[in-house]
Image (cartoon, grey):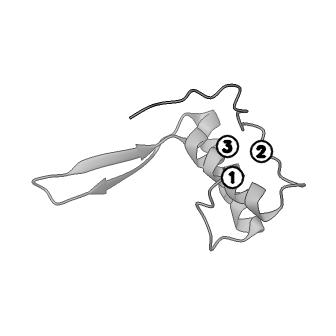
Amino acid sequence: MAMDYFPDFSVAELLSLRRDASEALVSGQLTGWRSGDASAERIHTTHPSSVIEMVNNSLYLRDPDTYPLTNALRVRRTTAQYI
């Protein structure tokens, strides 16, 4: 099931974001940001391919005929798990 990671974005904004992420992927860039204060700082990175996948999911939910999911995996077998 696809999830809309960008509910407030228009289709044009999503396409622009996907283009920017594709260019970052080709150039080898990572998107990073820092969180926390100086004593407990963490650096978070997001790979551009993850951003592209999130944008594709959002586009699919807006118009599935125009933007089909190409990375969706079909469930081939299920296994019962007893707890």
Which mark's residue is nearer the viewer, 2 or 3? 2
Q: Is residue 28 left or right of residue 70?
A: left
Identify the residue at horizontal 73%, vertical 33% (top origin): 74
Q: Is residue 49 left or right of residue 15?
A: left
Quadrant housing residue 12: bottom right
In the image, residue 55 sits, relative to residue 79, either above or below, namely below
Q: Is residue 42 left or right of residue 67?
A: left
Q: How far apart, in angstroms, are the residues tagged by discs 2 and 3?
A: 17 Å
Mark 1, secondary structure of its residue: helix
Q: How far apart, in angstroms, are the residues tagged by discs 1 and 2?
A: 7 Å
Quadrant housing residue 70: top right
Assign the C terminus to one quadrant of the image.
Answer: top left
Q: Earlier along the polypeptide chain: callout 3 or callout 1? A: 3
Is the C-beta separation of discs 1 and 2 under 8 Å? Answer: yes
- Kindly identify which numbered label has been placed on residue 22: 3
Residue 55 pos. (x, y %) = 66, 54
Residue 21 pos. (x, y %) = 62, 47
Q: How many marks?
A: 3
- Determine crowd level at label 1: few under 14, some 14-19, many 20+ residues with C-alpha closer than 10 A: many
| Residue type marked 2 | Leu
| Residue type marked 1 | Asn
Identify the residue at horizontal 66%, vertical 43% (top origin): 23
The residue carrying mark 2 is 69
| Residue type marked 3 | Ser
Which mark's residue is nearer the viewer, 3 or 1? 1
Q: Which residue in the rendered view is the most extreme toward the right?
A: 65
